[in-house]
């Protein structure tokens, strides 16, 4: 199988990730709950992953690195832990349902939001769109770093600066950019970074990260046992325990550290260069086919991440995906859980076929994909 659905989750996982998970399953004990050697070792392994994740994002407070099940959980923790009746939020026109569904839920509690239009390849117009969407009740700007459908990259450093210019909190969903685009939390105005562990970090599914990098601490949406101050019925105030109730995904967290180590060893710039080389080649080949519909300009590192979505005239995107699957190619078709992004390009009714490579994708894989699309 030629796997080109890495925006959903990277596959295959690196050997060291698989080995780390297997080893953790053999030695796991409940971290932070007991004083015996296995429990203490498990606590140490989780701390090492926390430190590794903090270093990866150039962040100095490892205790502010919170482990979650996925990026969606991290987003929910931020939105539902911060927003109250009367608050206003600004989002982009590219948001995933991980942002839009919790926001819609919060409108039942008096929260409102405005959609700021994104202009591909024009960061000035995009930033101005966010500026115009801010009003006197705006509490937060939350946006994706990169679209999981079109690969459009938002200028989050400028949007973060804009947010702080107006005294507004800034949260970012980096599920599609982490591991592809360097992110430096020490030199940004990001208050909350939400990301997935199983995509560009090559970790196991069931892993995600929330980094609380600003001074505002969200309220909790989950409470329970943390192994600390157990005599009290009150949730701890200290991080990370405040947000990590219950038994953690120990083997997943250990595997996540191995994934981050893998990305560090291969270097983000090398991974990005490799994937962009493949996507640019694919774009040029598809642009030669008159029945293939491309919705974006040729992707560049300045304005995109290496994701490419397309359609074939007269053929449903799901049918294209099914045909490719029969030929041994795994892709994602439909709306990719991002109707906002499809509304922007007029593909809400048709969806699109998404191609997303990884470090393991070969040029011959793309050549084979091109040959099969020609047959369609």
Image (cartoon, helix red, strand yellow):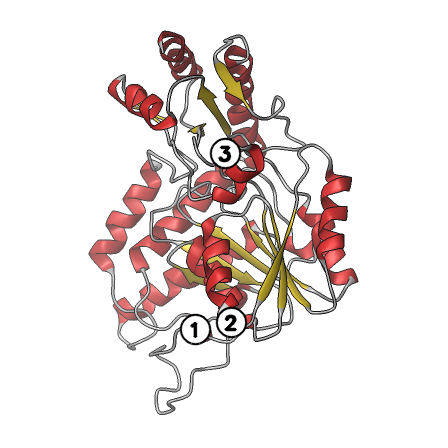
Report how far apart the C-alphas of labels 2 and 3 lie in the structure: 36 Å
Residue 275: x %, y % from top left: 51, 26
**Which one is nearer the viewer's eye here, 345 or 55?**
345
Above or below 85: residue 38: above
Which tag is nearer the camera, tag 3 or tag 1? 1
> Mark 2 = which residue?
81
Report how far apart the C-alphas of labels 3 and 1 lie in the structure: 37 Å
Mark sitting earlier along the chain (2/3):
2
Residue 56: x %, y % from top left: 55, 50
Number of callouts: 3
Residue 232: x %, y % from top left: 38, 91
Q: Which part of the image, by quadrant, shows the C terminus?
A: top left
> Mark 1 = which residue?
221
Residue 210: x %, y % from top left: 50, 60
Which quarter of the figure has residue 155? top right
Residue at x 55% of width, y 25% of height: 276
Secondary structure, mark 2, is: helix
**Mark sitting on residue 266:** 3
Residue at x 51% of width, y 37% of height: 342
Secondary structure, mark 3, is: helix
Determine whether label 2 and label 3 are within 8 Å by CB: no
């Amino acid at each position: 199988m030629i796997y080109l659905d890495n925006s959903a989750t990277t596959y295959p996982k690196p050997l060291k990730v698989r080995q780390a998970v297997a080893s953790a399953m053999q030695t796991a004990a409940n971290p932070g709950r007991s004083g015996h050697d296995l429990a203490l070792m498990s606590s140490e392994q989780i701390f090492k992953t926390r430190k590794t994740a903090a270093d990866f994002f150039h962040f100095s407070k490892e205790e502010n690195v919170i482990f979650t099940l996925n990026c969606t959980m991290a987003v929910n923790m931020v939105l539902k832990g911060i927003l109250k009746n009367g608050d206003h939020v600004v989002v982009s026109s590219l948001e995933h349902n991980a942002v839009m569904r919790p926001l819609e839920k919060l409108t039942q509690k008096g929260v409102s939001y405005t959609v700021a239009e994104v202009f591909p390849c024009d960061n000035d117009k995009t930033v101005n769109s966010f500026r115009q969407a801010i009003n006197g009740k705006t509490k937060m700007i939350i946006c994706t770093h990169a679209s999981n459908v079109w690969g459009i990259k938002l200028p989050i450093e400028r949007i973060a600066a804009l947010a702080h210019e107006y005294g507004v909190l800034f949260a970012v969903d980096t599920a599609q950019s982490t591991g592809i685009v360097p992110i430096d939390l020490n030199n940004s105005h990001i208050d909350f970074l939400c990301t997935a562990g199983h995509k560009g970090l090559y970790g196991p599914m069931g892993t995600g990260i929330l980094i609380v990098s600003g001074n505002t601490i969200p309220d909790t949406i989950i409470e329970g046992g943390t192994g600390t101050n157990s005599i009290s019925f009150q949730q701890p105030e200290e991080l990370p325990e405040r947000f990590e109730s219950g038994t953690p995904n120990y083997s997943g967290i250990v595997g996540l550290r191995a994934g981050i180590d893998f990305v560090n060893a291969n270097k983000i710039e090398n991974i990005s260069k490799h994937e962009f080389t493949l996507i640019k080649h694919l774009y040029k080949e598809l642009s030669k086919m008159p029945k293939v519909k491309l919705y974006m300009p040729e992707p560049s590192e300045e304005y995109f991440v290496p994701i490419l979505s397309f359609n074939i005239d007269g053929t449903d995107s799901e049918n294209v995906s099914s045909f490719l699957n029969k030929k041994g190619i795994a892709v994602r078709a439909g709306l990719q859980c991002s109707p906002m992004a499809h509304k922007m390009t007029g593909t809400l009714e048709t969806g699109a076929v998404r191609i997303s490579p990884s470090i393991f994708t070969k040029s011959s894989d793309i050549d084979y994909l091109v040959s099969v699309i020609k047959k369609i």
